[in-house]
Amino acid sequence: MPKERRISPRFALQVPITLTVPDAGLKVHGTTRDISGGGIFLYADAPVHTSDEIQLTLALPYQLSPSEVRVACRVKVLRLEQQNGSSSKGIATAIQAFDFLQE
């Protein structure tokens, strides 16, 4: 059995996200599958490759805080998984930096 490499617990959380692919000047919408302190797994139809750095913007639901919290993250793509019968791909990312956005 492979050894678990995660250092932060994962939380199943499906929220809409916007990916910005800087090299392509492209914005794509997607959905998270789960989030941890170190990374985000998401589904999107985005032209990304392993080791790419992309920007994500998401809003954490108000159930997790007194009001909706918008977060911008710079992430590195670690792994891609093609989804059967879908144009979306699973994208495993590692968070490089993040910032809370003001309304």
Image (tube, rainbow, N blue to C red):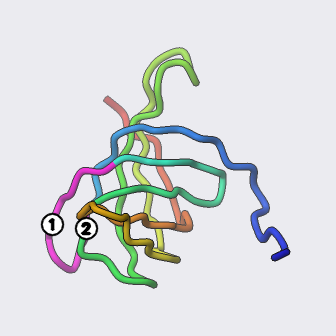
Mark sitting earlier along the chain (2/1): 1
| Quarter of the figure with the N terminus | bottom right
Q: Residue 71 location, x and y as percent?
A: 43, 43
Callout 2: helix, strand or loop? loop
Q: Main secondary structure of the magenta part?
A: strand
What residue is pinned by disc 2? 46
Q: Residue at x 46, y 74 (%)?
A: 77
Residue 78 inside the magenta-drawn segment: no
**Left or right, 102 with reference to 37:** left
What residue is pinned by disc 1? 26
Instruction: Choose top left, top right, bottom left or bottom right for residue 91.
Output: bottom left
| Nearest the eye: 72 or 76 | 76
Q: Residue 90 location, x and y as percent?
A: 42, 64
Q: Residue 101 location, x and y as percent?
A: 38, 40
Q: Residue at x 36, y 34 (%)?
A: 102
- Marks 2 and 1, how far apart in space? 9 Å
Callout 1: helix, strand or loop? strand
- Label 2–label 1 contact, CB within 8 A: yes
Q: Residue at x 54, y 15 (%)?
A: 66
* Neighbourhood count class around disc 1 (C-alpha, 10 Å): few under 14, some 14–19, many 20 upward: few
* Neighbourhood count class around disc 2 (C-alpha, 10 Å): few under 14, some 14–19, many 20 upward: some
Q: Which residues are magenta?
A: 20-30
Disc 2 marks a residue whose amino acid type is: Ala
Furthest toward the left, the residue is 25
Residue 27 inside the magenta-drawn segment: yes
**Left or right, 75 with reference to 36:** left
Q: Is 30 drawn above or below residue 77 in the view shown? A: above
